[in-house]
């Protein structure tokens, strides 16, 4: 299926870091195999509404990279794929790849006929479960590859057969099976990105119990025009327009009981999202509860700009509890204003938890790769397998791109040494 040669560079993860590493290595003349476990490339960046500090949409940058990938014959990519075993050493790795069935083949034109006859609904993973989608679906409107997916829950049912019959192009293959194949690679770039810290573990904030307590990644989807509320900032419980919103910084971060470290970008994400709220509803008021604001280097001006908005308030506080008013669905935020030395009890329509970043590190049979005590890969101490982007440290998109380019150079050096 894939040429067996240790001149390949394997990139695990098809987010911004993985795509960048793959393109840079391929354009330098090396063969690249890219595997991504989601049914599309682009990772979490595809779920963002805007980047900071320019507040521009991410799709323009992704479109350029996808074009570069399509034009480069040295890159082969597999979606719904992941490595299940890695053995060997620098310059000579044997890797076993598993590809899960999509049940939709390359004949798909995205006509949507299968979706029209499908009745079963599932939680929408792209919108973090904030809404429902059909069990045969296009992951999102800019998906690459642009192809539908069938959820395994309906495979083997009469409904799946109806979807198959509705397809005029013969694109639905209900006999599609899991595939496993082996490749050789001279170097591996691990660019599997991050996951938000599980906010349900922060029991005193009520995430999962109170519908109007959401996380910062969910806020990105709410603000997006292709999101669950079509870009209107509405609270999940009753779809009312949000007029008073709180952002709780360091939700679980810098806390020995949860994440002891600072993720560095959560403050910037909340500053960015505050601009979403103010732009979409000029009558709204935003309160940001913070320990200290981390907006270093070129982002200092962005922080200053947001502070100038008289309806964005900053209160230095580590919030202690969040309680729901059962009658209204509003949220009571309690804590202490550490600057004034006063107790806080304030009411909001919705609360956004700024959760930290947790790395998706190697959790399969593989040669030992040095990690720090939090699970982040230490690329400098490894040879042959290199981390890129947020698996090395919490960081923003621009820095992840730079880091991925460095990882591509390291991988090329691994091959050149052999």
Image: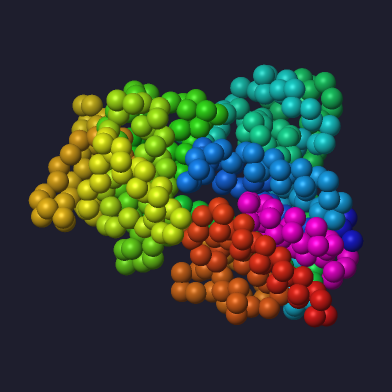
Q: In this view, does 334 lie above or below 339?
A: above
Q: Which of 163 and 300 is in front in this view?
A: 300
165, above or below 51, in the image = above
The percent position of residue 62, horizontal first and vertical second, equals: 66, 43
Residue occupying image coordinates x 31% and y 44%:
307
Decide which of 209, 331 is in the foreground and name it.
331
Indicate how the structure is coloured in the image: rainbow
Residue 131 in the magenta stretch? The answer is: no
Left or right: 290 as drawn, with respect to 402: left
Q: Number of marks in the image?
A: 0
Name which quarter of the figure residue 158 lies in.
top right
Report if residue 393 is visible in the image: yes
Q: Residue at x 73, y 20 (%)?
A: 113
Quadrant in which the N terminus is drawn: bottom right
Q: Give the range drawn in magenta.
A: 4-31
Left or right of 345: which side holds 380? right
Spot occupied by residue 39 in the image (x, y as percentages of width and height): 68, 43
Q: At which x and y percent is residue 58?
A: 59, 41
**x and y percent of residue 415 in the render?**
80, 74
Image side of residue 319 versus residue 254, left or right = left
Residue 191's quadrant in the figure?
Answer: bottom right
Q: Is residue 400 above or below residue 351?
A: below
Residue at 29% over, 57% down: 292
Residue shown at the point (18%, 46%) measured from the top left = 334
Can residue 126 be seen in the rendering of this structure? Answer: no
If the image is split into quadrants, where does the C terminus sit? bottom right
């Amino acid at each position: 299926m894939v040429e067996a040669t240790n001149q390949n560079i394997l990139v695990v993860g098809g987010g911004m870091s993985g795509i960048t590493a793959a393109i840079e290595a391929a354009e330098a003349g090396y063969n690249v195999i890219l595997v991504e476990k989601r049914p599309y490339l682009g990772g979490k960046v595809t779920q963002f509404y805007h980047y900071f500090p320019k507040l521009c949409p991410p799709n323009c940058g992704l479109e350029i990279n996808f074009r570069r990938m399509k034009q480069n014959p040295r890159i082969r990519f597999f979606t719904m794929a992941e490595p299940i075993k890695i053995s060997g050493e620098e310059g000579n790795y044997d890797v076993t790849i598993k590809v899960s069935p999509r049940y939709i083949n390359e004949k798909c034109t995205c006509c949507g006929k299968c979706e029209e006859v499908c009745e079963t609904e599932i939680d929408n993973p792209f919108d973090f479960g904030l809404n429902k989608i059909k069990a045969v679906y296009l992951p999102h409107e800019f998906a690459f590859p642009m192809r539908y997916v069938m959820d395994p829950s309906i495979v083997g049912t009469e409904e799946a057969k109806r979807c198959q019959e509705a397809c005029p192009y013969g694109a639905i293959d209900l006999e599609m099976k899991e595939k496993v194949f082996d490749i050789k690679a001279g170097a591996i770039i691990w660019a599997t990105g991050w996951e938000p810290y599980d906010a349900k573990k922060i029991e005193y904030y009520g995430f999962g119990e109170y519908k109007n307590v959401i996380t910062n990644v969910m806020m990105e989807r709410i603000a997006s025009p292709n999101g669950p509320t079509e870009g209107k900032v509405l609270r999940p419980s009753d779809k009312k327009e949000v007029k008073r919103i709180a952002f709780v910084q360091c939700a679980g971060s810098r806390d020995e009981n949860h994440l002891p470290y600072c993720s560095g970008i959560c403050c910037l994400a909340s500053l960015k999202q505050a601009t979403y709220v103010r732009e979409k509803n000029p009558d709204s008021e935003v309160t940001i509860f913070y320990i200290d604001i981390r907006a270093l280097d070129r982002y200092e001006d962005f922080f200053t700009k947001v502070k100038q908005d008289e309806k964005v308030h900053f209160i230095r506080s580590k919030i202690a509890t969040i309680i729901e008013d059962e009658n209204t669905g509003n949220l009571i935020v309690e804590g202490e204003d550490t600057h004034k030395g006063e107790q806080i009890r304030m009411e909001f329509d919705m609360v956004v938890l700024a959760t930290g970043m947790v790395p998706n590190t190697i959790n399969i049979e593989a040669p030992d790769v040095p990690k720090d005590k939090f699970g982040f890969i230490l690329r400098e101490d490894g040879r042959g397998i290199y981390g890129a982007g947020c698996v090395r440290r919490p960081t923003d998109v621009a820095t992840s791109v730079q880091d991925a380019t460095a990882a591509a150079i390291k991988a090329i050096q691994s091959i050149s040494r052999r």
